[in-house]
Structure formats: structure tokens, C-alpha cells
Amino acid sequence: MSKSMLSPLRAPRTLLLNRTLLITALMYFGVCLCWGTTWLGIKIAVSSVPPLTAAGLRFVLAFPLFWLFARWRGEPLLFPAGRQGFFWLITLGYFALPYYLLNAAEQQLSSGLTALLFSSMPIFILLFSRLLLAESIHRLQVIGILLGFSSLAMILHEQGVLTWQTNGQTELLSVVAILAAAGLHGFCYVMTKKQGAAISVITFNTLPIGLAGILLLLCGSYWEQPQWQAVSQDSWLALAYLGWVASVGGFLLYFYLLKRMSPVLLSYVFLIFPLFALLISAWFEQQALSPQLWLYVGTLLLGFLLTKQQQSKPVAK
């Protein structure tokens, strides 16, 4: 058969491939943008809603859509038998406590800086993988850890956070809270690999989000006693965006890509969305980004990228 006869058959396949690649690229961009705007949404939400209550409302709004999606997919809501302890770890250690810490921290820090600090999570995954799974840490990964944390310190210094004034101490506590949230997420990721690898990602999210939302709201009602009449329209819109778009919409896009992309390539989302968050934060909060800050941010993300690399000769076994 001649090439001229084959080309009409190849053309539809080429168009279909190009269309699929375009849709995948747009969805990848959508995940980065969705999760990059999450941090600004939190900043606006906690401007008039206390942090416990804000985190609870976000999850309570998200839960019905997750539940409908789970029903549509025919996925179970309950974790497998014998995984009750793991269920509570995810509910409290992945959703409830970390998101409260993030909400509380953003009352003091910019949304862009919060996103950059939280992007240290790959380092915690690497460290907990070494401690809990006895996985090897390679030379490039060690360099990445040192580069990442040193860059974070330089960013904090450049932003004037590393001070011992009264306001500086409050900001330092916020930094510790964000790093604790990143550490909890890293720990839960590793425990998921150890105990929950067979659990559907839909099951993993649905019931823990709903229960975490209720627990956070109850705690907020008791300790924060929110004044609902004082909640601004912007905060309500931000909470709706966080619950329905950032949580559910971002999850659905990520779920779609998880079925169609390399997990390694998809994991780079966690290196890209902090850039989106930083740019959006600078625009919304009218902050100038110095060339020096961009240098530190680039070094930071390079360090986190190195933590994903493998070498033939490990440092630790």
C-alpha cells in the first residue's frame, strides 16, 4: 500500500492524538492553577472567618459532591476492615489538623509564602520513607534536602520573617505551623503507601473530608464562637471556591490525570503550583517580587526536584 493511501488513515489518528494531548495539557494546567489559587482563597476566607470554622466549612461544602462522585463511580465510602486506625489518621492527620494549621498561619503570612513553605512536603515524604519504609536516600536527594531547606531559610530572611520582634515571633510560629502541616501530609503519604495502597483515591478522600469538616466545625463553634453576621461576602465566596472548585474540581482533574499520565510527571504539579500561588499572591496583595527572591525560589524548587531523583549508589541503606 502506498504512502498516499496510508496518509488519510493516519490523519484522524494524528488529530485525535493531538486533541488528547491538548486536553491533557489543559487539565494539567488546570490542576496547577486550581491548587495555586487555593492559598489566596484561604487568605480571603480567614479574613473574617476563624481558622477552625473556615477549614470545617470548606470540607462540609465539599463533602456532598465527593459523596455523589463516589456513588456515581460505585466506590465504597468505608475503609477496608482492619483499617480503622488508618482511617482516623487520614481524617485527623491529613485533613483536620493540617488545614487548621494552614488557615491559622495565613492569618499572619502571605498566601504565596505559605504555598512555598508547604511545597517542602516532598522532603518530608523522603525522610519518612527512610524512617518508616527503610527506603534509600541517594546523594542527589541529600543535596536536594539541604538545598531546599537552606533556600527556605533565605526566603524567610528576605521576607523579614526571621526576626525576634513580637510580630516576628508570631510569624515564626506560623512558619512552624505550615512546616508541621507539610510534615503531617508527608507522613500520611508514606503511611498510605504502607497501609492504604489498595484503597481507592475516592474512598480515601470522601468520608474523611466529611468527618473532618464536622469535627472542625464543632471545635470552631466551641472555641472560636464565630460571629456569622460579621462574615464578609468575599469570605463566603472564597469558602465556596475552596470547597467546590479547589477541593472537588482540583481532585477530579487530578483523578482524571492520574489514570492517563506517568505518576512521576504528575507529581511535578507540587513543584509548579507554588509558582502560581506566588504570582497570584503578589498580584492580589500588591507585593513586589525582587530578583533575589526569584533566585531563592528557583533554588528551592530545584532542591525539591532533586529529592525526586534516583542514583545507583545510595547514601543510606
Image: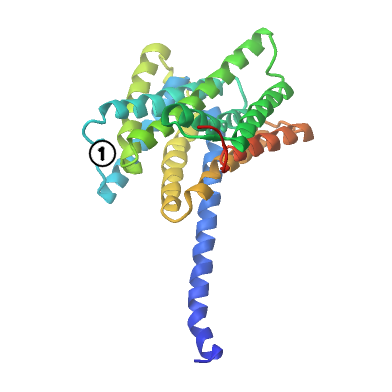
Residue 141: horizontal and vertical position, in percent? 59, 35
Above or below, 41 relative to 198: above
Front residue of 176 and 315: 315
- Compared to residue 312, the image places residue 8 above or below, namely below
Q: Nearer the viewer, residue 316 or 283?
A: 316
Q: Nearer the viewer, residue 306 or 232?
A: 306
At which x and y percent is residue 245? 45, 42
Q: Dot 1 lies on which element? A: loop
**Disc 1 target residue:** 77
Residue 134 position in % (x across, y down): 44, 31
Q: Amino acid at mark 1?
A: Leu
Who's the residue at 53% across and 51% down the image?
28
Res 215 → quadrant: top left
Residue found farthest to the right: 291
Q: Quadrant of residue 175?
A: top right
**Residue that protrudes farthest toward the bottom in the picture:** 1
